[in-house]
Amino acid sequence: MTRTVALPDGTPDGKTVPVLGQGTWHMGERGGAAKDEAAALRLGIDLGMTLIDTAEMYGDGGAEQVVAQAIAGQRDKIFLVSKVYPHNASRAGVPAACDRSLKRLNTDRIDLYLLHWRGSHPLAETVGAFEKLKEAGKIGAWGVSNFDVGDMQELAGLKAGADCATNQVLYHPDSRGIEYDLLPWCLEHRMPVMAYSPIGQAGRLLRSTALRNVAERHDATPAQIAIAWGLRHPHVISIPKAVDPVHVRQNALAGEITLNEEDLAAIDAEHPPPRRKQSLEMR
């Protein structure tokens, strides 16, 4: 059974979503790859990874077009996440950007719409625009991405700020700064954290001796162990990206791996948890 997590009470119908979804960063950048990218997303959907994360930034909208191909004919089974650029996050800019994303995604609604990172527009203005989109039925819920604790505290103090459904941040064994304060803050406020780049970038993390040793014990790959490591937290959603069908299948199976205390201790030894406040990392 696919494990799920509940979004905060401000979202429609007490919505629950799969803890393991699919990312699309770097998709839609080459037209010739779109067919394979869409096929990979469809395979992931068939394997239960029905949460798909994208953004207007990815491929200058190209990733959203790839997602449109992948979800055609099965929109109702998908939990669709997209993001607005900070420079578009004004009172007038948010609805205009949302309409462009809806057109590229070929849908009438986005299930979860995120502010991609903190920009110059006042948070109250952005949140007000998000709330109007909810009222219009164009989005089901809203959230943020790349927000640190101070940002989240400011957000929580706003009218409707408690309706924030998630904070999407970088999180993997080599990037654990959120464990010191941000992750506990989100858990205290019953807000799931959505982890992007859960296997790191450029393959560096996957060369980890600890991940490789743990992977051997579980007859798995280091990437699967990295994903399972993030999912050890019951309120973390992981959105790995894959185009190779083999990797898509491996990602889907990662959700079934349970790491034991020995595994976690080995990973901690090579990738230690934070002992002090760290600046929030972004890719």
Image (spheres, rainbow, N blue to C red):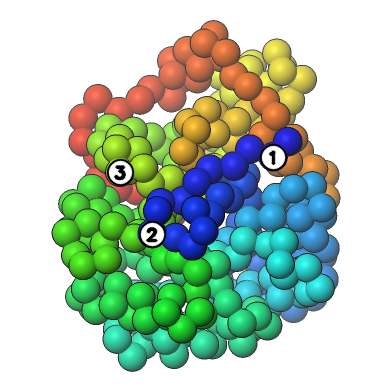
Which disc is residue 189 wearing? 3
Q: Amino acid at mark 3?
A: His
Q: Residue 167's x, y, as percent?
A: 39, 53
Which residue position holds label 1? Answer: 2
Q: Is residue 132 left or right of residue 17?
A: left
Query: Left of 272 or right of it: where is 14?
Result: right
Image quadrant containing the C terminus: bottom left
Q: Position of residue 278 (x, y in %)?
A: 24, 39
According to the picture, the residue beneath numbered tag 2 turns out to be 10
What's the CA distance linking mark 3 and mark 2?
Answer: 12 Å
Q: Residue at x 55, y 72 (%)?
A: 110
Q: Secondary structure at mark 2?
A: loop
Horizontally, residue 229 falls left or right of residue 279, namely right
Per the image, label 1 sits on a secondary structure element best described as loop
Which of the 4 image quadrants contains residue 249? top right
- Total marks shown come to 3
Give the quarter of the image for residue 159.
bottom left
- Between the residue at mark 3 and the residue at mark 1, the CA separation in whole angstroms equals 24 Å
> Which comes sooner in the sequence, label 3 or label 1?
1
Against 58, residue 257 (above or below) is above
Position of 184 relative to 45 (above/below): above
Nearer to us in this view, 191 or 216: 191
Q: Nearer the viewer, mark 1 or mark 2?
A: 2
Residue drawn at (63%, 38%), measured in percent from left and top? 3
Relative to residue 240, is residue 273 depicted above or below? Answer: above
Residue 26 at least partly seen: no
Q: Residues within 10 Å of mark 3 (few under 14, many from 20)?
A: few
The residue nearer to you, when weighing 86 against 282, is 86
Q: Nearer the viewer, residue 81 or 222?
A: 81
Label 3–label 1 contact, CB within 8 A: no
